Image (tube, coloured by chain):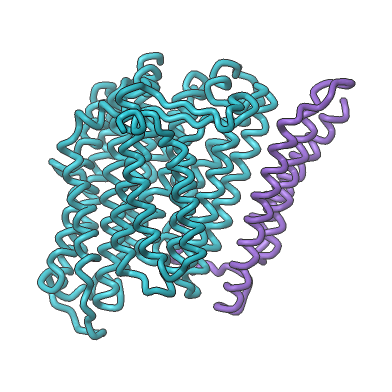
Amino acid sequence: MNSPMIYALLGITLFSVGLYGLIVREHLLRKILALNIMGSGIFLMLVALGKRSAGELPDPVPHAMVITGIVVAVSATALALTLMLKLVEASGSAVLHDAPKDRS
Amino acid sequence: MGDLLTDAHWGVLLILLPLFGGLCSFLWPSAVKFIGLATVSAVALSVVGLGDQLLATGVYHHAVGGWGAPLGIDLYADGLSLFMLMVTALVGLGVSIYALDYFDQDEARRFWPLWLLLLGGLNALFLSADIFNLYVTLEIVGLAGVGLASLSGGGAALDGAMRYLMATLLGSLCYLLGVALLYHSAGTVDIPLLAERLESTPPVWAALGLICAGLALKTALFPLHFWLPKAHASASAPVSALLSALVVKASFYIFLRLWLEIFSVRTEGVDDLLGALGMAAIIWGSLQALQQTRLKLMIAYSTVSQVGYLFLVFPLAAIGTFSAWSAVAYLVLSHALAKSAMFLVAGNLMHFGGHDRIADLDRAVQRLPITVGAFALAGVSIMGLPPSGGFIGKWLLLNEALNQGRWDLVFVMMIGGVLAAAYIFKVLGFAFTQAPVTHEPKGVPAVMEWSALLLAVAAIVVGFLASPLMLILGIGETVELMGAGQ
């Protein structure tokens, strides 16, 4: 197995770990971190797959995508953290409570 | 002057105007309402300009900065894009007029910059020609939508906005992973090039699954609709209207676009799965709507069920024709108009009585005849009674299902219509009866009543405009070619 493939598989693993965390963890900060881990997994995969064969220069387009993706991830994280702080201020806890009737 | 109008880059203006307007409204909060309304009107005029150009010259294509695909970003508009831009401009205009009186100066200062950012994101989304740019615009739309949903600031609104943010980010990340896999398989993100290069390999299948799952989450397709009722019901009325009418349709548009251009020939079984989920959404959403005691939650669950209708097109279009795709475009248009009118009506009733409990509407008919009239007209379109836009869309879809002998789809559409009638007449019934007064009624500004009525009337009037709308939809022949090619 060549090394780009290993990094790509690692990226998929990170994505899955993040997805697991997002679903299982209740605390909002953990959920936000989980989303960031998922994002990092995708970025790692994009960069790894940009290098298609040994010796050849890597494809720059995925790198540009990763930079754009990082900008999006930073703003999304900032928004999520602010929202979380506001929610803690308003409700006193950083966990989303499900009332039974709203589960559907 | 004539040359100036036909040669102008309306597509570029459609993206820059709202972004510029949003910045201005942020910088000059004292003039925020004027800047906001002026920008939205200018955007509506630009859509007309773009439409005029497209009717004269066919599809619009613009390579930003002169770079062009595959390296640069392309703007592209055909009949389907124009149709969605029109829906956005129409609903946007109605909701903007309503918002003038709904928000006080302090709230308006926060509402307008976010709404104009959302408008810019939506327009850019409908004009994008590559799947990575679609991801970026999807995120702009999602983040602006979350900001708007949290505007009213109470615990419920923040809770709803947080759920919405989690769902929308998860959806975008799944979509982005799909994009990464597609780029790896085809070496491009440009939609027309992808359509040529993609082959049926395992990575492409994984990408298809991820993109479909991510977009279904954002479109709130059953059973991925869990975030929608809370987010849409707890936001302030104009925001609920925008989220339900436009934001949900944006991700559905990407679904439709990718399906038409990239995935159409590689999807054995997936179309039936989407159709089955759509059917489940219609029944489940309607039943939930029927059980709600709060008006806004009822309208939000109604959105879940109406989104189901949109997905019925996929099994039908597998051997279908132009009429299946035009049916779904019609449903998008009439649902956007009717649902925004309904949420604005809910805003009026809340402003009037201080609550949205359906059972305590207390003779709203006599006291707010225009508002309840708007609700009834919007209801006619949601139920799919003639001569509304909703009727044309559902009739075309039903016709197609009958032609193909899909009795399961026919049956579910019928049941959905009956259930929609049940939950709408329930509200109207309580609007006629007396209830104990719990709150001193407040007058509703005329602008808020009339803008809701205008949107509702528009939802009916589009029922009479079938042929011009079909003409617009046919520009560029994306829809027709794909329908015929299958």
- Give the vertical position of B157 relative to B373 (above or below): below
Q: Residue furthest front?
A: B1
Chain letter matching colour purple: A
Quarter of the figure with residue B392: top left
Q: Position of residue B285 (x, y in %)?
A: 36, 51
Q: From the viewer's perspective, is A97 left or right of B283? A: right
Q: Nearer the viewer, residue B367 or B26?
A: B26
User: Which image quarter holds the C terminus of chain A?
Assistant: bottom left
Residue B159 can be seen in this image: yes
Total numbered badges shown on the rendered structure: 0
Chain B colour is: cyan
Q: Position of residue B141 (x, y in %)?
A: 50, 50
Q: Is residue A80 above or below residue B248?
A: below
| x, y percent for residue A62 | 72, 33
The residue under the point 43% across, 42% down is B14
B35 relative to B468 in the view: left or right: right
Task: State the quadrant of the N terminus of chain A.
Answer: top right
Spot occupied by residue B273 in the image (x, y as percentages of width and height): 46, 33
- Of B462 and B388, nearer the camera is B462
